[in-house]
Image (tube, rainbow, N blue to C red):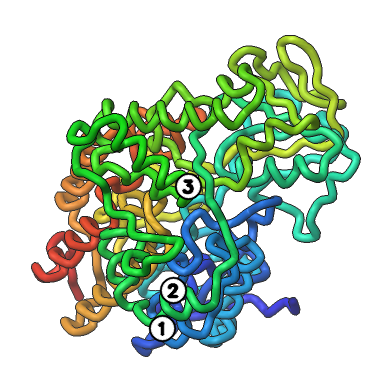
Amino acid sequence: MAQIPADENARFDAIIIGAGFAGMYMLHKLRGMGLTARVYETADNVGGTWYWNRYPGARCDAESLAYSFSFDEELEQDWNWTERYATQPEILKYAEHVADRFDLRRDIRFERRVDTAHYDESNNRWRVTTEQGDSASAQFLITAIGCLSVPALPDIEGLDDFKGHRYQASLWPHEGVDFSGQRVGIIGTGSSAIQAIPVIAEQADHLTVFQRTPNYSVPAQNFPLDQNWVDAFKKNYRGHRYNQKHGLNSGFGDLKTEIAETVPLAEVGDDLSDAEIEAGLEERWERGGAYFMNVVSDSMMSERTNARFVAFVHKKIRETVNDPETAEWLCPTSHPIGTRRICVDIGYYETYNRDNVTLRNLRKTPIERITERGVLLSDGEVEIDTLVLATGFDAMTGPFFNIDIRGKNAQPLKEKWVEGPRAYLGLMAAGFPNMFMITGPGSPSVLSNMLVSIEQHVDFIADCLTRAARENATKIEANLDSENWWVSHVNDVANDTLYPRGGSWYLGANIKGKPRVFMPYAAGVGAYREICDHIAAQDWRGFEFSA
């Protein structure tokens, strides 16, 4: 892509950071309001997480017909997905199609990494600079930087000593990797690894999986989409979208086909016998997908109900994996099911029955260091040719801390969030006027279908800007008392669930020294949307508008 000259002292109504799905829709929305906008994007193309995450087997764990934009009916009718769960290349192709269809690229500056974003109180504008020399200002700053966009390297001695090939799942080479004839080691068994391991195992001469904490995974039961089924589905797309946006079910509820409705069998697990719960779990297991967890409504609230889910999945793992010791190592015991991101896989547990796959339990034989030739465990060295790191992200706050963001009185956002993120509705931080965060900490974000949450946030921000323009207000700021109330509410909701017991990146537990604060809003997109709508109806309670 030809390099475009840097912006020099350019002025816009809004500056958007990031050209993933959030940044693209925000740009489209602002244009429709007659506002000027500039988007700065680190990559050389649109797509966000689907640009970077190209590891083998990468695909969405939300069903493709639901993981797509709803704001344009012609777009959703014209675009055709090929599989129930779309692959990374297909999702990236969709993002490119959206950018081209709405001519978004002309307002996007690619290969621009934002370095600073400072609020200037004297003129009520945000000044943004990039590492490539851009300098621009805008009345509004909107972050669309994603929740999982800063890779986390493992804290293991000797990583740079390894002489073989080393790859990171979230920064995969665009030309791909051929593992034929190689001894491969992969560190991590989170979502990315669970998708990648079956694919790598099919290519590699031998694959060694280094696992510290096993994760729960359910089968995707993926299949090619039948066009007749898709046509019937699209006739009621509005109804499906309504269900998705209000958290009623997956949005696939009124077509009696392979994907049936996902309403729970009961509100409380104790109302069902063990046989009834097992039958419901078996039906969902065979259907596939993460909606496995809502067989009973209190699966994330009741230890007893959750334990019945755990027993079912453990049974499935033991039935699938031939080696009893390997099966036991793959059974998670340190956290309730669902309190860490539940994974959706294609043949993950079956992969451990292959002769060329070995699981190493790092709880029994921890990694001492990485050597020139491989991975040194407490019981000896495992020699490999290629090392794959699938060790997750500095989630939710990491992308913000990669930019020097400063609000009133030049306060760094990193300083305000030193004990954990604080934001009203996950949208605005007190002391940072005219700065909006799409799917920020304190919103449903990573616990939801991200496209649903993105659209809701963008629409809410647009309505907020419209309210300001109507009143000739030039400054919008979150009220500190309202911010404190919301942060307290987010924590109260989380503490009423089993989520805090997961010890996951939801809490920042995967990053050394990071505050342990549950970051997403656990009540779901339906409850969150109702709260946002109620606040807007109360003349935007908690938001201060001034000239």
Indicate the secondary structure of the residue bearing disc 2: loop
Asked whether the beta carbons under mark 2 and mark 3 sit within 8 Å of each other, the answer is no
Residue 294 percent location from the top left of the image:
32, 46
Which one is in front, 163 or 194? 194
- Quarter of the rendering occupied by the N terminus: bottom right
Q: Earlier in the sequence, mark 2 or mark 3?
A: 2
Give the labeled residue for mark 2: 69
Give the image location of residue 425, x and y in percent. 26, 55
Residue for point 68% across, 37% down: 351
Q: Amino acid at mark 2?
A: Phe
Tell me which residue sits at (48%, 74%) in the image. Answer: 229
Q: Kindly identify the residue that appears in the image at 47 percent across and 80 percent down.
A: 231
The residues bearing labels 3 and 1 have C-alpha atoms spaced at a distance of: 33 Å
Residue extending furthest toward the left:
538
Depth-wise, is mark 3 or mark 1 nearer the camera?
Answer: 3
Choose between 365 and 28: the one closer to the eye.
365
How crowded pointer 3 is (Cα within 10 Å; few <14, some 14-19, many 20+) is rated as few
User: Where's residue 79, x and y in %?
Assistant: 53, 80
Residue placed under numbered mark 1 in the picture: 72
Quarter of the rendering containing residue 153: top right
